[in-house]
Amino acid sequence: MSILVLAEHDNASLKSATLHAVTAAQKIGGEIHILVAGAGAQGAADAAAKVAGVAKVLLADDAIYGHALAENVAKLIVGLAGNYSHILSAATVNGKNILPRASALLDVQQISEISAVESADTFVRPTYAGNAMTTVQSSDKIKIITVRATAFDAAAETGGSAAIEKVASGGDAGLSKFLGQEVQKTERPELTSARIVVSGGRGMQSGENFKMLEEVADKLGAAVGASRAAVDAGFVPNDYQVGQTGKIVAPDLYVAVGISGAIQHLAGMKDSKVIVAINKDEDAPIFQVADYGLVADLFTAVPELAKELNK
Amino acid sequence: MKVLVAVKRVIDANVKVRVKADGTGVETQNVKMSMNPFCEIATEEAVRLKEAGKVTEIVAVSLGNAQCAETIRTALAMGADRGIHVQTDVELQPLAVAKLLKAVVDKEQPGLVILGKQAIDDDSNQTGQMLSALLGWPQATFASKLVLNDNATANVTREVDGGLETIEVKTPFVMTTDLRLNEPRYASLPNIMKAKKKPIDALTPEQLGVDPTPRLKTLKVAEPPKRSAGIKVKSVAELVDKLKNEAKVI
């Protein structure tokens, strides 16, 4: 068996999500290749070659892969698919955008966001916002899979010395074009890979009040997240959203502030190692999953927390 | 331009889902069913395009058992013009849905197909991408803003990791909706009454020439491991102490 893992990267470097997908590939077993499709992506390919357990890196370097347009990357994957028993990607926005397109072109029913590998054809995946863990067996010749990064440890970033092989571009499908992006500029760690996450909910009352959380987050080296309610209320952008419809996180410490704990939010954070809840409503469902609960008004507790962390 | 909207009937988002004791699935008996929230956003977007004069007709499609007709009625009450119900009792997986929708698109020739980015039951997030692949069309997934241009293209802003991205796609194309695209309306009573008179055509997978047999076999459905509640602390100082000295996470 050989397994192709689609790299998540920014051309210069490899994103940590890829390391988790490599671990899932190791659990399946077989020779692991990483595909880096990018523009000027030698840096990302070099990083991929160092990942422990990787046998080969395929580098498709072409301007058309600069922004990971699904039409072009899926076409490239389809061209390479014949050599592989499994094709994996982390369940990032890119992975979710590209892999189903490749699956349909290969007449394969993809298996989304697996959280465990039972065997080479059998996998566990959360459904119903994580309220039901479903074990599925695939009868397709190639298994195409996205991986829930938080369910697998990261493979070691160093220790490997894979060869980098250049592969020909699959060509431009000519269907879509990248126009621009607005990326949040922040010194804080990325939400999905942060060791600590501080999240706010509807209880924050305004976007302005999130500054209090940012202060705490900066003291802890944490990322800032939010519940869907806070996003819907317009306090913060959607990419802050933790939950079934947003990002899935599993940090060492998750601090939920002014978050009631709707099912859809819990689905995104309940695998965190330690959960802290600060809420003035002592009956809030968030306390049922919190390791440490503080029943308090967040507008006094959060500044106090910032002060306490200075000590 | 004609728009096709795909709508899925799912367990209502506010229902606490329970796994069946025999591990074959989840409890659906006497459980409230609704239109998948992302499909509501898809329907709303189509209706707004029609209200803006950019779209002439909205066709709402649902696939599955007899009750899916109710979900089509919901879309009709929101403003869709007519419905297509692909009737089957076979468990439909995303690839089969994409193939069935492709067959419907081939008949209907819309300029745009809008779907939700994922259904909140199987959480697959595949169908829109698969449909556009099968049609050879561009895909604009995780959409938070749509602008139809005059030159047979559209600009779509997408919710990506870390922010927003805008792409230009050629029409016809497939779009999948993210949360912030719009806020779906509630259907008014007069519109619900009017929707009862709107036509719904029934089709079968056989008529569409598609084999919907599932590729994935469900072996088991289980409850996730339960997380138990911890302790309540009395003060911020105690909390910080516990995090430092007991949990050792800060």
Image (cartoon, rainbow, N blue to C red):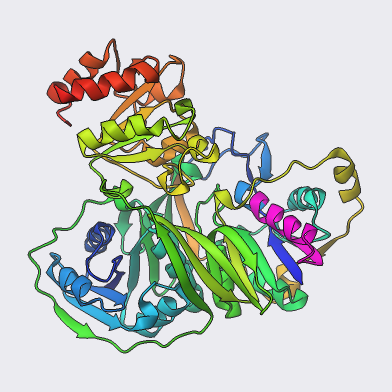
Quarter of the image that includes the C terminus of chain A: top left
- Residue B182 is situated, as x and y percent measured from the top left of the image, at 63, 49
Q: Extreme top residue here?
A: B234
The residue lying toward the viewer, choosing from B138 and B126, is B138
The residue lying toward the viewer, choosing from B85 and A273, is A273
Asked whether B161 or B195 is in front, the reply is B161
Instruction: State which region is magenta.
Output: B40-60
Per the image, is B85 magenta?
no
Residue A225 shows up from this direction: yes
Residue A84 figure quarter:
bottom left
Q: Is residue A241 above or below residue B176?
A: above
Q: Is residue B123 left or right of residue B34?
A: left
Say which residue appears at 79% left-offset and 64% top-offset. Answer: B53
Image coordinates for residue A306, horizontal then vertical, percent: 25, 25
Nearer to us in this view, A308 or A112: A308
Q: Is residue A289 above or below residue A144?
A: above
Q: Quadrant of the N terminus of chain A?
A: bottom left
How many discs appear?
A: 0
Question: Does residue B22 appear to the left or right of A164 in the view shown?
Answer: right
User: Residue at position x 42%, y 88% from top?
Assistant: A171
Residue B79 position, x and y percent, is: 80, 53
Q: Residue at x 64, y 59 (%)?
A: B90
Identify the image quadrant of residue B156. bottom right
Is residue A2 visible in the rendered image? The answer is: no
The answer to which image quadrant residue A211 occupies is top left
Q: In the rendered structure, does residue B58 fall within the stretch colored magenta?
A: yes
